[in-house]
Amino acid sequence: MNWLEALTAELSKDGVTQNKLARDLGISSSMLSQVIRGIYPGSTETLQARVEGRLMDYTVQCPVKGCIRRDECVDHQNKPFSSANRERVKMHRACRSGCPYSKLEPTVNAQRIDVRVSATDEAYNLDSQLAFIRRSAQGDTLKLNGLLEKELSRLASRYNQLLWSSKYARRSKS
C-alpha cells in the first residue's frame, strides 16, 4: 500500500473527516482535498512523510534519537536552530551532517554522524525505548502491556547471553 492509498483508506473509516485528518497531519483541509483529487500543484514530500509516519508507522534510525517515526524525522529537520537545548543542538547537527534520511543539504562545518543500526553498538537508552513503546501502543493499554512484556523478554534474553558469555570467558582464561 502506498501513502496515497493509506490516506484514502483512513478517510474511508467511520468518524474520520477531511478536516479532522488534515488537522492531525498538520496541513490545511484544502491541501488534503487537492492531493486526494490529484490536482495539488506543490510538493507533497512532507505530506508523504507525515502519512507514512502517522498512518503507516514507518520508522527511521535517527543518529541522535534512535528509532523514530518518519514524520518526526521531517519535523526535526524543519526546526530552527536553538542552543538552549543540547538535544536540539545534536539534532540540528545530525540533520545537516549527511544523515541518510535528511533532505537538507549537508553544511560544510558539520561532521558526518553514522547511523547505528544494531542495538548492540550502543548502550541501552531506557527513555527513548519507553517513548517508542508508548508511541507504538497509541494509547491502547493492552497493546502497551504486550509491548512491554516483549521488551522485558528481549532484555532478559540479552542479559542471560551476557552472563553466559562472561561465565565462559572467565573459564577459558584460566
Image (cartoon, rainbow, N blue to C red):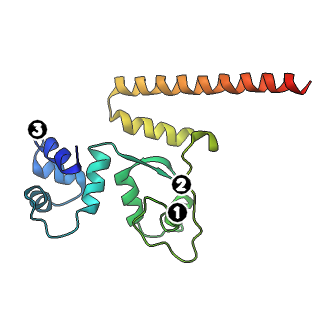
User: Residue 75 at what x, y percent from top left?
Assistant: 37, 59
Looking at the image, the residue that sits furthest to the right is: 174
Q: How many angstroms separate mark 2 from mark 1 (CA)?
A: 7 Å
| Residue underneath mark 1 | 94
In the displayed structure, 84 sits above or below 138; it is: below
**Camera sees residue 103:** yes
User: Residue 134 at what x, y percent from top left?
Assistant: 41, 36
Select label 3 or label 1 by which is in front. 1
Q: Which residue is drawn at 39% across and 66% down?
A: 103
Q: How many angstroms separate mark 2 from mark 3 (CA)?
A: 38 Å
| Residue underneath mark 2 | 63
Within-10-Å neighbours for mark 3: few <14, some 14–19, many 20+: few
Report the amino acid beneath label 3: Gly
| Residue underneath mark 3 | 15
Secondary structure at badge 2 equals loop
Report the amino acid beneath label 1: Ala
Q: Do the residues labelled 2 and 1 touch (CB within 8 Å)?
A: yes
Secondary structure at badge 1 equals helix
* Residue 75 shown left or right of residue 89 in the figure: left
In the displayed structure, 89 sits above or below 126; it is: below
Report the amino acid beneath label 2: Pro
Q: Could you tell which of marks 2 and 1 lies nearer the N-terminus? A: 2
